[in-house]
């Protein structure tokens, strides 16, 4: 489920990116829109991870592993991000679920990092095209 959410989110963020900075080739507006687009993409990635963390927290609550939403969310966040403080933990029978969440979080965060690297290279390629167009006009 988290992979499906992440994939759908990345497709949506790609659409936003294409509609954002690539629409206006004007040099000043392009730079401004690039910055706004990148910040928007980072916020979007953060929201995607938050949704995935909440998904696990809901499962933990459904399994009666925690008494409060705060405890389930705290555990899910520290597990998903692989911080794993160890101050809150699951019952023995559900510990492998936490291990799976940790591995899943590691992959999702890596996927987001790869997406950001790809975004940066696309922006650089777009900047090169725009600059070449301005040089041709001169």
Image: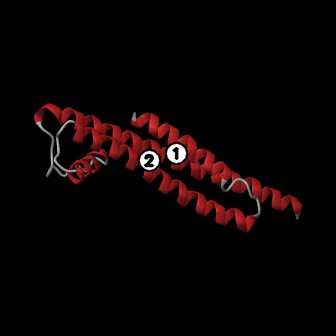
- Mark 1 — residue? 115
Name the spot of residue 49 as percent of width and height, x first. Answer: 40, 48
Q: Residue at x 40, y 37 (%)?
A: 2
Is disc 1 surrounded by few (<14), some (14 to 19) or many (20+) residues within 10 Å? some
Judged left or right of residue 85, residue 14 is right
Of the residues tagged 1 and 2, which is closer to the observer?
A: 2
The residue tagged with tag 2: helix, strand or loop?
A: helix
Closer to the camera in the image, 127 or 34: 34
Judged left or right of residue 42, residue 30 is right
Mark 1 or mark 2: which comes first in sequence?
2
- The answer to the question of whether label 1 and label 2 lie on touching residues, with beta carbons closer than 8 A, is no
Colouring scheme, one of rainbow, by chain, secondary structure, one colour: secondary structure
Classify residue 92 by image quadrant: top left
Q: Quadrant of the N terminus?
A: top left
Is residue 121 visible to the viewer in this orientation of the structure?
A: yes
Is disc 2 surrounded by few (<14), some (14 to 19) or many (20+) residues within 10 Å? many
Q: Residue at x 45, y 38 (%)?
A: 5
Classify residue 97 by image quadrant: top left
Q: Residue at x 67, y 51 (%)?
A: 19
| Residue at the bottom extreme of this rendering | 28
Of the numbered discs in the image, which one, if any, rests on residue 41? none
Name the spot of residue 82 as percent of width and height, x first. Answer: 28, 47
Q: Residue at x 59, y 62 (%)?
A: 36
Name the spot of residue 106 as percent of width and height, x first. Answer: 35, 42
The residue tagged with tag 1: helix, strand or loop?
A: helix
| Residue at the left extreme of this rendering | 92
Judged left or right of residue 77, residue 130 is right
- Mark 2 — residue? 48
Closer to the camera in the image, 79 or 59: 59
In the rendered picture of this protein, how many numbered marks are placed on residues?
2
């Amino acid at each position: 489920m988290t992979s499906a959410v992440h994939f759908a989110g990345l497709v949506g963020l790609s659409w936003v990116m294409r509609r954002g900075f690539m629409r206006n080739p004007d040099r000043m507006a392009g730079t401004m829109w690039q910055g706004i687009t990148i910040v928007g993409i980072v916020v979007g990635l953060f929201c995607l991870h938050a949704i995935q963390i909440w998904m696990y927290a809901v499962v933990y609550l459904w399994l009666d592993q925690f008494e409060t939403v705060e405890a389930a969310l705290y555990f899910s966040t520290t597990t998903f991000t692989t911080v794993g403080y160890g101050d809150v933990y699951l019952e023995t029978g559900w510990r492998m679920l936490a291990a799976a969440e940790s591995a899943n979080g590691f992959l999702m965060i890596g996927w987001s990092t790869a997406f950001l690297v790809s975004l940066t290279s696309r922006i650089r390629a777009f900047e090169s095209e725009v600059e070449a167009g301005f040089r041709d006009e001169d």
